[in-house]
Image (cartoon, rainbow, N blue to C red):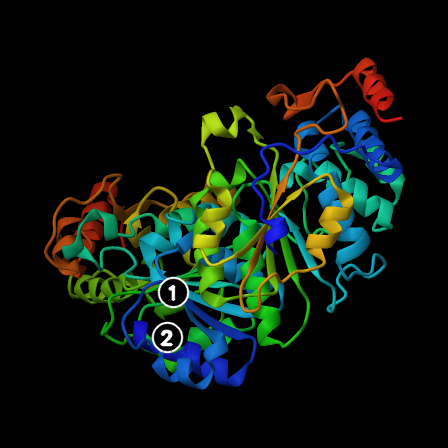
Amino acid sequence: MRNTCLNQVHALAKRDERVVFIGSDLSPGLLADMKREMPDRWYMEGITEQNVVGMAAGFAMEGFIPYVNTIATFITRRCYEQVAVDLCLHDLPVRLIGNGGGLVYAPLGPTHLAIEDIAIMRALPNMAVVAVCDAQEMQAFMNVSLGWPHPIYIRLAKGGDPVVSRKENGFAIGKAIPMRRARARRPVVLMATGVMTTNSLAAAELLEREGIDAAVLHIHTVKPLDEAAVLEHAAGAALVVTVEEGVGIGGLGSAVTDLLVEKLGTGLPAMRRIALPDAFPHHYGVQDDLFDMFGLTPRQIAATVGAALKAKDLVA
Amino acid sequence: MDSLVKPLERTAAVELDARSLYLRRLVVRALEGGERGHIGSSMSLIEILRVLYDDVLRFRAADPRWPARDRMILSKGHGCLALYAVLADKGFFSLDTLDTFCRRDSILGGHPEAGKVPGVEASTGALGHGLSVGLGMALAVRVRKSDSRIFVVTGDGEINEGSVWEAAMCAGKHGVSNLTAIVDYNKIQSAGPTREIQDLEPLADKWRAFGFAVAEVDGHDVDALRDVFGQVPLTAGRPTAIICHTVKGKGIPFAENDANWHHKAKIGADVVARMYGALE
């Protein structure tokens, strides 16, 4: 996913002379071809996140479309004021590409775990937040990213993630994709973002074996939220379950809940929110270990759904 | 350049001419309208901005987004009263607009907003942002092979921010000779003297160490400012830093060099009258 994303920056730059790449202190030789072909549109500025974001704003004010890349925690937390003021207040078309969204950097510990990136980026006016589910979808997203006139936070997954997206679904920023449809009159609806869509699809398979019919709505754009799709899927659902690789505070589950409360008032569906707890993870291992620790594996997601249905005495 | 690189601890007692007094009266006019404002921080800036707009910058007031313009970012956004006075004087908007300062529907807030105030390039107020934004602009116009120049005016307290030095390091690396940082060095930040709060010295050496060509000048001496700004870039292939030694509150004797006048709210008619009295 990361390679696809960055290679696409180069491809976009060939297509559109407004595209600029700005990195902090990334891998040696990163986008070396781009650097060679267009040295005045490739920048590696060192560990200066505040400066990098401000610099990107200056480029964008002059009509360029900068794609900025560094580790997710640093591109969000370290320069939050620059993101808020330089990018969002000016509503500039800068793209922030965050490596290692969520629990990807499990072995590196809590300083490198982007657990609240979606929440804090989503809180900023004008910012779009996108977490695609695989490399193929990343390709589709990057193709349309040029035309979005506002800032975008792009959360990258681990890389080498299983491809579950389908080209025929197309891609539009802000348009959720039904990845699995249910036949039941009152189905379970799993709403997920990023690679949690992959885990939710696998969970739906497990649920099917137990006779539970679950739809999966892939919300690759957490902001702006596809309100119509969320409302349509929530209507008549026996249970709505949001699944995300991030803290519950302010994330996808929060966005969906906010919308349902605002639009449905008293007619709210039964809900469960599967997310990370309000705590810094203090274990290492690999991403899958932390998924397991925090209930994000397909089996655990299915179990949470089953338990919720049982507790509510709901039929799916 | 050697004649310009002199450490100046204080500005000479520069006599303000009629135009400097007039621009300061415009600041007081806005203060009167808003009954508040960053007085000390604006008064120290007047000659810097006056000379930039009178003699240095290429711009069209009727077409603020003219692509060939030079860009001026007031990174110390709290000094906006001085910028508003100069922009109004130049015809970016009417002088009457100054009377609406900080009112609910005014375009003129306590910090300047791009897209709202004609002539304001970037919304500032959060400190330490302008130099990075200016660097991005400087690189962008260089890519486009435009000869526009970028001037970023910072405060002295402002450059406590680490982000300024990140930007300086990168500007030095890129050798952007179309970028000039101007420091309004009035030696007093909000909490008190810069020497006590966060000493910046040796300030010229710091900029030099980051790859800038540096000059120091009396920031109220219009001829000296004209001279040094006219020589930018001071060295080919390098960004420029011009340290302007100024007096906080310059022109208002009871506010000069007094941290208590960094910002004032609830400014009454009596204070306004005393200010006008000082500026006749």
Q: Is residue A5 above or below residue A195?
A: below
* Residue in the foreground of this view, choosing between A44 and B147: B147
Q: CA distance from mark 1 to mark 2?
A: 9 Å
Asked if badge 1 and badge 2 are on a common chain, one would say: yes
The correct choice, above or below, for A84 with respect to B272 in the image is: below
Closest to the observer, A270 or A29: A29
Q: Nearer the viewer, residue B250 or B58?
A: B250
A122 is higher (above) or lower (below) than A141: above
Q: Position of residue A263 (x, y in %)?
A: 52, 45
Amino acid carrying label 1: it is Asn
In the image, what residue occupies the spot 51% across and 57% down?
A: B212
Few, some or many C-alpha atoms within 10 Å of disc 1 (few <14, some 14-19, many ≥20)? many
Q: Which mark is residue A69?
A: 1
| Residue beneath the point at 74% across and 36% down | B81
Q: Residue B64, how many percent across, how many down?
A: 78, 59
Specify the label residue A6 is tagged with: 2
Instruction: Please give the chain letter of the residue carrying mark 1.
Output: A
- Please give the chain letter of the residue carrying mark 2: A
B198 on left or right of B8:
left
Q: Earlier in the sequence, mark 1 or mark 2?
A: 2
Query: Which residue does the image show at 50% across and 77% down from the upper left?
Result: A40
Which x, y percent locates residue A198? Answer: 26, 67
- Do we see residue A151 in this rendering? no
- Residue sitting at x 68%, y 60%: B231
Contact check, label 1 and label 2, Cβ < 8 Å: yes
Check disc 1 and report its element: helix, strand or loop: strand
- The residue nearer to you, when weighing B166 against A78, is B166
